[in-house]
Image (cartoon, rainbow, N blue to C red):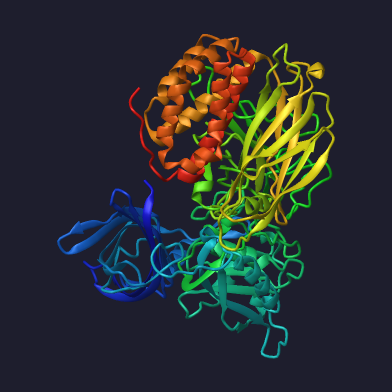
Amino acid sequence: MKATFKENILVKLQGNLQVNSEEEGKRNFIEGEMKLQIVEKHDKSVCIKLAKLGWYGLGVASKGKNTGKISGMAHFGKSTIKREKEGLSFTIQTTSDIVYKAIEDELGVNWISDHVTTVESEIFETIVSGKFDVSSDNEGKYQLRDLTITMRYKNGGIRLVDSLYLYQKRPSTFLLAGSTFGDIGNIGNCHPDLEVNERTLTIQPVGYRSSTADTSPTGQSLAVQMASATNIWGKCCINFNVLPIHIITDATLKTSSNITNIRASYASPNANAIEVFFVDNNLPSIGGGVANACNSILGNVVMSDNNAGNPQLLSHELGHILGLGHPGATFTGCTEPDDNTVMTPSNSPNNPNSTNNTHWNCINVANPALSTSTNTCCLMHDIPDTVLKDFPEDTGTESNPGFPGRNFYSMSNVWNRQANAAGGLNADGTPDHENPAKFEMDGVTLHTNYLFAKVDVLENLRVRDAEVRFYLKHPGAGGGAANLQLLGAAPITGTLTPGTTQTVSLPWTVPNGSPTHSCVFAVVHTPAEPSEDITALNWNQTEQLVRDDNDWAQRNLTIESTLMNFGNIAEEQLSFQPIIIDYPDEKGLKTVPLQIEATIAENKAIDAVELVFPSMDKCIMVKPGENLTVEITDSLRPGTKVLMIARAKMNKASVDIGNVQEAVGITPILGDTKIVGYGFSLKTGKNSNAISQLIDRIQGAFADFGEIAGPSNWDCLCKELQEIRRNGCSSSTTLTMLFRDKVDSLKKLQETLLKNAEEAYLFADMDYAYEKLYRTIENQESDAHSFDAIRDLINRFETLNWCLYLSYRETPLLQDEAC
């Protein structure tokens, strides 16, 4: 269930642990932190999650001994917040891994690889409970009090400790990035999903000299190694607090390879410090360095100081301290990191580790000694760089410079098919795109189309948890949620690696209210590279995003119109396509001139195309082979919608039925801005196909009206159209007779519907269409002329339908009388 509110709370732990309460009752000081995530849901329930619980101390006394350095890390847990008489309360049950020096001293370390060791942990059953006061200030809505943490030994280790108990009356807390409440972060140009709080790990360097006269103690590589570590782990918003180097005088240890003796030579008095020992030895048997991993305060490092060939050696070892293992290997207590990153072993102090660090590595960093800051930071990890190609030659360059003879809106690796089969490639190397259909053959059932996207990967890094999101937007549309619709997301299965591609598909149906000319924008979304919110972007800005960001691609859903061929008519209107140019009413836009750039390829089927602008009394005639640019108005104001009707006339003698498809390019120019994507195609076909297509379009328009106005007499006409479709109408006679019988009631119903929409009614010039249809009926003209009048009317219905959705989508209109 979707969350309505989220609060990430960081709790600072500080106090005395009560140890073995029933036996000794001794108290020992510890520090640490806990992260709680509170999520309120629509059903009013409140979930609480334990995202982190880590603590550390110099040691606790128990059973006559001392544990030495000790730390604990709890596993994830969750529960619900309950309302009781004394207020809100919660109890979370989980387990903790507790490690201390006495275990290492008694059992030694486990070598889990050539250069990674661990200390066996003890498992403690853990109960975290507390109460909340509800507040309304910027410190957070939920104020924690009476925090209790109880840990009881379960198994493992040496059982020096039986139980641990911590109580804090009013622990110190602050909100973390990602919270709904309060003023948290808001870093400019950082995606909210990548904004985190900075964390710091304290490092205690240790060097050796052979005598007090030795002027070359080990630790000379510290500065270079830390500079690299700061850069690599800074991508994860991890900082390092490097304490002054501690020098030990011991000639044997200076050149030693005895890891146990080196580690035993010094323990920092700082409970949260991670020791890093430098020796004058290449340590070839362990690849130049070793770390005591994972997730414990005992995670010290021993490494060669002769590491000039690998400035990332310490960065790699610190990754183990931070809870990461090796790619392709399973280390108990560690997270498996991504390959081709700093965590991929180089096995030598002279072979450099990679400087890459990924989102997966960053979000899995953990150590009880990490201290979280109130400062926020934007993750700057390396990304695998997924690509949706804009055309076959696209190399993924940002911003895309384009390629001769290619465009961004009809050649991309995003395409539609009418069935769940990706299809092949066209001769030019582009996917075999099909235009979407709205209905099945019965004229009522919505047809399921399939959007496809082919994803490439550029960098040699894994792609995790990816999906392709598909959005529907109309050419020229402004910003805002009303002008953008998320059709859905198609998951990418498994992980993607460079050199491989994956094609995904999304089933979808054409939404009611969609104009015949629409556009799909698709984006690859991953946690490592989350897609931005494009709700506020207008059409031009969204198109520019496709060019600037290789995760985005565009596919125009091209209009197709079927040519009628009536034997004794020498010149027939080929197509009537209503197109609306929408100049959004947005802040910063000014009155600009409107020009139209029109292009028709050289062909024999079309004599000419007329572009008519009824409200401006303008008409442009474009002939095959021409490329014209004509000014329609010198003062188009923001918020204006311009209707353009595209009509084509055929050269009947040259038409080969079913084999001619001609492209018409339409590019509105608003001031200095070109809006591509208005082109459409014209296709010849048989009468029966044209009738079938017209019924589709009528059904679509009426279904859209029904959604706006509710059940009405539109349904009556739809049912009769459905019956015609079901009976396989093969001529225009039946359809013409139906409209002759229904034209009066149709107009009456429409006028009722449009009482609140006179502007849209006039905009579509419906009266002209009715007069034309009445004239064919009164004069008893041929079916051919009547059919042409019906087609004219239906085209205007589609235009009217679009106007209604653009202008009156949020306004409930009057319902008509029952059928």
**Where on the picture, by quarter, is residue 454?**
top right
- The residue most toward the left is 85
Most foreground residue, 599 or 315: 599
Horizontal relation, residue 416 to residue 802: left or right = right
* Residue 573 in view (yes/no): yes
Horizontal relation, residue 244 to residue 481: left or right = right
Q: Residue at x 67, y 59 (%)?
A: 356
Most foreground residue, 451 or 259: 451
Q: Is residue 82 above or below residue 469?
A: below
Q: Is residue 559 above or below residue 535?
A: above
Residue 211, image x and y in percent?
67, 87
Residue 778, image x and y in percent?
55, 17
Q: Residue at x 47, y 28 (%)?
A: 702
Horizontal relation, residue 701 to residue 305: left or right = left
Report the number of numbered marks. Answer: 0
Q: Is residue 697 above or below residue 672?
A: above
Residue 536, image x and y in percent?
54, 55
- The residue most toward the bottom is 213
Query: Which quadrant holds the C terminus?
Result: top left
**Where on the picture, by quarter, is residue 398?**
bottom right
* Residue 489 in view (yes/no): no
Most foreground residue, 775 or 188: 775
